[in-house]
Image (cartoon, grey):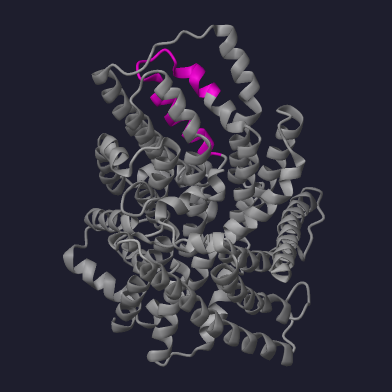
Amino acid sequence: MKIAKTLWRIIDVILFITVLSMLVVVLMQVLGRTFGKSIPWSEEMTRNLFIWTVNFGMVVGFKNVDHARVTFVYDFFKPSKVRDFIQIVIYLLSAVIFFTFLTIWNFQMSFRQLRIREISPALAIPMFWVTIPMGVCSVLALIAVFYTVFLDPDKRERILMKDLELVANMEELQ
Amino acid sequence: MSMSLVMMLIFFVLSFIGIPLALSLGLSVITTVVSFGLPITVIGRLMYTSMNSFLLVAVPLFILAGSVMGKGGVSDQIFGAAHTLVSRLRGGLGYVNIIASFVFGGISGSSVADVGSLGPLEIKAMTDQGYPKDYSAAITMVTATLSSVVPPSILMIIAAVTANQSVSACLAGGFGPAIILSLMFVVVNAYVSIKNDYGVIEKIRFKDIVKINLKALPALLSPLIILFGMFSGLITPTEAAAVAVVYTLLISQFFYKTLNWKEIPRQIVNAGVTAGTILFIAMTAAVATYIFAVDQLPMRVSALILGISHNKHIVMLIFGLIFVVIGMFMDATAAILLITPVLLPTAQQVGVNPVHFVVFMVTALSIGLTTPPVGVCLFATSLVSNLKIETIVKASIPFFIGIFIFLVIYALVPAITLIPVSILT
């Protein structure tokens, strides 16, 4: 439980750093061009930061049970323990199957790139560091889904929520 | 064709039983790739490639700019300024609602954010003046679609990238439908308000008008700065988004003095999270697009549609119908990513301008945000107004009729998109 909380905190810090760095690098790009000193690596740097951002953002999306989905079909059934159980099992299973496959395939791809020493064009860093976030974040997303289902009762409630209640908790409305 | 059909069928079944859309897409893609013997390695590679885009970086940055604006009390400024302009008219607050959403859309790119931040303000002001609550909620909801059409719009950026069209051109094109759609709202509001004698005619002193507008000026300037930078070619849309973040931070700190720096780190993190949840769908959809391509689905669909007609007006009307129906049932981002690669080739074949296609698609799909059974703006409006979904939908019918007429006209007149594009870019 405590380890998980620390993990979420670390991910928040990573996201803070990547989004802020994107902002800074893009601004540097504008300033650089204005003063006639364009920065050759700014665009590639931004894209790499962006890939990390999107993947880690996706993980937090699973930790908060924020990914868009359609739940109105469950309104046709009377509320019951069985209905809730089915809904949670479906949610959990879908994530487990998808992210297990994705983790394996991504690690295969990234480690192959590491072996053949594929290098990025402008920054000359190993491509491994550019493609690995998807594998890392697939593992983290799995942890997040298990965490919400088994360890965080509030978030488990969210898996069972109807569309209307889900929107009620959206960040943008607060 | 069978491959795409199998994939779509699995996708619909999975998303129908409550599996997050991105996972439903991902699982249907994996099943199809494996069972039809396509190379598995494409899945990881395509998901990575789809996010390897400098243009999409604009998405988290515009989200951040919008949320800084929201926290900085800028919505109140916009609302106040709009109020001084139209308070003398019957149904005045209805017009305020339209203008405020238009200006808000010039800063934020999200319709839900419009309902969330302007909605409570607008509905309270309208009901205080005796407008029925259901009508107030209805106009608040339909005008929120403007945020997805007025540049900058997150949906428009995603659509332009998907269609491989210039992001600036598509954003600029959004001005056309946004203006005509607003005029349509004005007509409906005038008709309903005069018929039912809604609202109170207020006289605001000239001195106050000047005072309120001067105070709101920095907020009102922000969309202009974003747009000028972008359309003059000085900066790219992504860079404009970064500049917008800095500008909003500066005016909230030094002019409105409403900025709480303690909240900024949270907002920065949330911008990343929101972008990640929206774009995760784009990642899995990229593989679905690959399956469509292998399956030659665009060609087959094109043959099917061209079998009905070669006339580009009729084709656009058919597309409009498809967009509206899909928009009712599907999340707008997912819809954009699945529709664009399939229908764009047909559109180009009959001579529809691709920019017009993209802007028309986003406009039609953003209407879907307000319709049942799946409409985030509808749900959000129901929350901020405490009204039942059915009540809001019923009160929105005059607007829906107006929107329908607008969409038919817009499908037939590409100049609505192309004139602002040629002026601005």
Please tell me whether residue B407 belongs to the stretch shown in magenta. Answer: no
Res A13 → quadrant: bottom right
The residue nearer to you, when weighing B95 against B141, is B141
Q: Tell whether B21 sits left or right of A77.
A: right
Q: Give the range drawn in magenta.
A: B80-106
- Quarter of the image for the C terminus of chain A: give it: top right
Res A112 → quadrant: bottom right
Rendered location of residue B108, percent (x, y): 55, 43
Determine the residue located farthest toward the left in the rendered image.
Answer: B308
Q: Is residue B175 above or below residue B189?
A: below
Rendered location of residue B399, percent (x, y): 29, 36
Q: Tell whether B415 sits left or right of B308.
A: right
The residue nearer to you, when weighing B16 against B252, is B16
Badge count? 0
The residue nearer to you, when weighing B195 against B407, is B195
Q: Is residue A172 visible?
A: yes
Rendered location of residue B47, percent (x, y): 55, 75
Rendered location of residue B235, percent (x, y): 66, 49
User: What main secondary structure does the magenta stretch of the protein show?
Assistant: helix
Q: Is residue B236 above or below residue A51?
A: above
Q: Tell whether B415 sits left or right of A16.
A: left
Residue at image location 53% in from the left, 54% down from the top: B167
Q: Is residue B80 above or below residue A139?
A: above
Determine the residue located farthest toward the front in the rendered image.
Answer: A81
The residue nearer to you, when weighing B251 against B163, is B251
- Quarter of the image for the N terminus of chain A: give it: bottom right
Residue at image location 44% in from the left, 18% down from the top: B86
Q: Is residue B232 visible?
A: no
